[in-house]
Image (cartoon, rainbow, N blue to C red):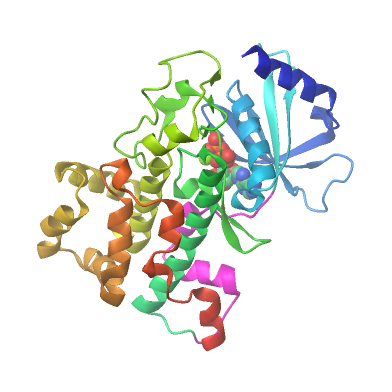
Amino acid sequence: FDMFVLAFVERLFRTTYRKDDFVLGKKLGEGAFGVVYRASLAKKPSSKNDGDLVLKKATEYGAVEIWMNERVRRACANCCADFVYGFFENSSKKGGEYWLIWRYEGEATLADLMISREFPYNVQTLILGEVQDLPKGIERENRIIQTIMSQILFALDGLHSTGIVHRDIKPQNVIFSEGSRTFKIIDLGAAADLRVGINYIPKEFLLDPRYAAPEQYIMSTQTPSAPSAPVATALSPVLWQLNLPDRFDIYSAGLIFLQMAFPGLRTDSGLIQFNRQLKRCDYDLSAWRKTVEPRASPDLRKGFQLLDIDGGIGWELLTSMVRYKARQRISAKTALAHPYFDREGLLALSFMQ
Ligand code: ADP
Ligand code: MG
C-alpha cells in the first residue's frame, strides 16, 4: 500500500492540472462513490456551456480507477473512453477526493439507445448516418446487433489482453463515441488488474446483480476477504489461466446480447425476471428456451427468430457466453472469431444498398 501512495505522491508533483483549471457543467451521473459532470478547461471554455470533457469526482476508490485508466490508455487506448488525466485533490472534506478527466465521447450509452423504440435502427443511424431506403426487418436488426456485439467484444478483448477484468459490463457502461462512431467501454471503477495485482476487494459488494455472473467473486480464493485499501496480490499468468477471471465479463456481455435480441428483456424488470427463470433452470439457456418457447409471447418469438438466423449461429454464440461455469464460456478473442461474425457487418451493408 505504501508503494501505491508513493506512486501517487510522485504523480502529484508532475501535476499540470488542478481543480481550478476546470469549469463544471451539467451533472451526468451520480453513484455511491462518485459524481460525474460535463466539464471544460477554464482557459478555453467551449462556446456552449457544455464542455468537451467529462469529470468524475470520486471517493477513495478513485485511486484504483485512475490506475486502471492510465494502464488502459497505454495498452489499449481505443477500448475505453479517452482518458485525459487523474489527480488527487485535497479538500476540506476528510481525505479529499480523486478527480478523473476524460474526453466527452457522446451523449448516448447503449442503455439509452436500447431503451428507445427505434433500437437497433437508432444505432444504425449513429454509425452510418441517415441512410435512406434501407429495408427494416429481422435480418437487418441482426446485422446491427452483430456490429454492436463485435465492438463490445473487441473492447473486452483489449482489456483482457491487458490483464484487466472490468467486472461491471452493462449497457450503462458502454458509450457510443461520436468521434470514432464505435462503442467504447467506460467506468473502470470496479475493474481488477490481475497481472499487476491491483484489485479492490471491498467493491465486490458493488457488483451489479443484474449483470453479474453466478460465480460473482472472481479469484476469491487468492484474495483476502475485506482489506480497507488496494491490495497487491501476486497473480501469475498461470493463475489467470486457471481461474479465467475474464469470463466474468463475458457472461455480462452475453446478457447484453440477450437484451438486444429480446426487447422484453431490455427493461430492469424484464431482465430481473429472466435472471430468476435462468437460475431456476440451473443457468442452462437451452433449458430456459425449452420452458419458455412453447408459450412464448410474440416478443420472445422474435428474439429466437433473430438468433436462429443462419442455422442458429447467433444462438450458438449466446449460449457459449452465458454459461454457469466460467471455464466453459468462450473468451472475447475466440468469440470474435465465431462464425456469427463471418457475415459482413453494417459498414459493408451500407455499400450494398
Ligand atoms: P458511475 O460510477 O456513476 O457509473 P460512469 O463512469 O459510468 O460513473 O459515468 C456515469 C455516466 O456519465 C455514464 O453513464 C455516461 O452517461 C456519462 N459518461 C461517463 N464517461 C463519459 C465520457 N467519456 N463521455 C461521455 N459521457 C460519459
Ligand atoms: Mg457506470
Q: Residue at x 17, y 58 (%)?
A: 289
In which quadrant will I find the N terminus? top right
Quadrant hosting residue 297: bottom left
Quadrant hosting residue 208: top left
Residue 340 image point, x, y percent: 38, 68
Work out which residue is located at the far right of the displayed protein and give it. 43
Vertical placement of residue 76 versus 180, above or below = above
Vertical placement of residue 347 versus 196, above or below = below
Q: What range of the chain is rendered magenta?
A: 104-133
Counting the numbered discs, the total is 0
Question: Is 17 left, or right, of 352 in this rendering?
Answer: right
Q: Nearer the viewer, residue 89 or 342?
A: 342
Q: Residue at x 66, y 49 (%)?
A: 77
Q: Residue at x 32, y 66 (%)?
A: 314
Residue 101 image point, x, y percent: 71, 38
Q: Nearer the viewer, residue 347 or 136?
A: 347
Q: Is residue 311 magenta?
A: no
Vertical placement of residue 202 versus 77, above or below = above
Q: Would residue 40 be visible to someone looking at this image? A: yes
Residue 228 image point, x, y percent: 51, 13
